[in-house]
Image (spheres, rainbow, N blue to C red):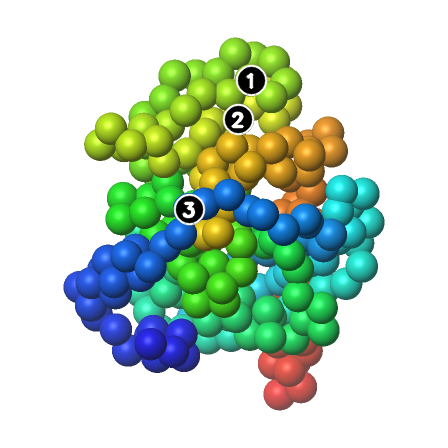
Amino acid sequence: MEPAGYEHLTPARAIAYQHELRRQLQIKPLEKTIHIIAGSDISFNKYSEVVYAGIVLFKYPELNIIGNATAISRTSFPYISGLLAFREVPALLEAWNKLEIKPDLLVLDGQGIAHERRMGIAAHFGLITNVPTIGSAKSRLTGKYEEPANELFAQSPMYDKGEQVGTALRSKKNCNPIYISPGHLINMEQSVEVIKNCIRGYRIPEPTRQAHLLVNQLRIADGKNTNNQFSMF
């Protein structure tokens, strides 16, 4: 199914499609060396059809920025918890297709398999692009865990129905943990290690932090352009 058609799906059909995708998911060791890593983020108002997407490329492990791509898209798919990928993926794919260099690994601001159907945006996007992906989320969607100790890189496994679906990682002292889960073509342990290597003094890893800044700039600039258009009348 092409992501451009997602907005025509009913929620029930979207859930059925997640189950189809789940059967194709591969959580396994990443065997290739990571030379280029990317972070992505999405911004939208749940009551608006406009979606802003951004991807930032970095050399790894240095994390020097070497490029980026953005996209502004529209969707009529409703805002439903557990189905946000159907709003986000088309815009993100548009930005992805603009990249002149594709990364060895993509970190997404959202869930990988730490999702009730194991199909968060990182898993979903990894599957349709066949790229290794990691979900690094600021809030928990699925999975129970014990609070990790209040020290840098303390961690606690997250379980759902007896299966480890993620890791709660203390990326900064005196801050809430972040929630790491593999998306596709990488395993749990590697996902956590990569994210730890991407922490640069902030709660969220540098790839998604920079992508967040990029999409905010895009959204602000688009808002100014819209206001300028209205001011002409």
Q: Considering depth in this image, is 180 or 190 the residue closer to the camera?
A: 190
The residue sitting at the bottom extreme is 233
Residue at 35%, 31% (x, y): give it.
164
Specify the quadrant of the image occupied by residue 89: bottom left
Dots 1, 2 in contact, CB < 8 A? yes
Marks 1/3: CA–CA distance: 23 Å
Specify the quadrant of the image occupied by residue 170: top right
Which mark, residue 27? 3
Residue position marked by numbered label 1 in the rendering: 154
Q: Considering depth in this image, is 70 or 188 the residue closer to the camera?
A: 188
Marks 2/3: CA–CA distance: 19 Å
Note whether residue 203 is visible.
no
Mark 3 element type:
loop
* Kind of residue at badge 3: Ile
Residue position marked by numbered label 2 in the rendering: 169
Residue at 48%, 40% (x, y): give it.
187
Other residues around mark 3 within 10 Å, as few (<14) / some (14–19) / many (≥20)? some
* Kind of residue at badge 1: Ala
- Label 2 vs 3, first from the N-terminus: 3
Task: Specify the quadrant that holds the C terminus.
Answer: bottom right
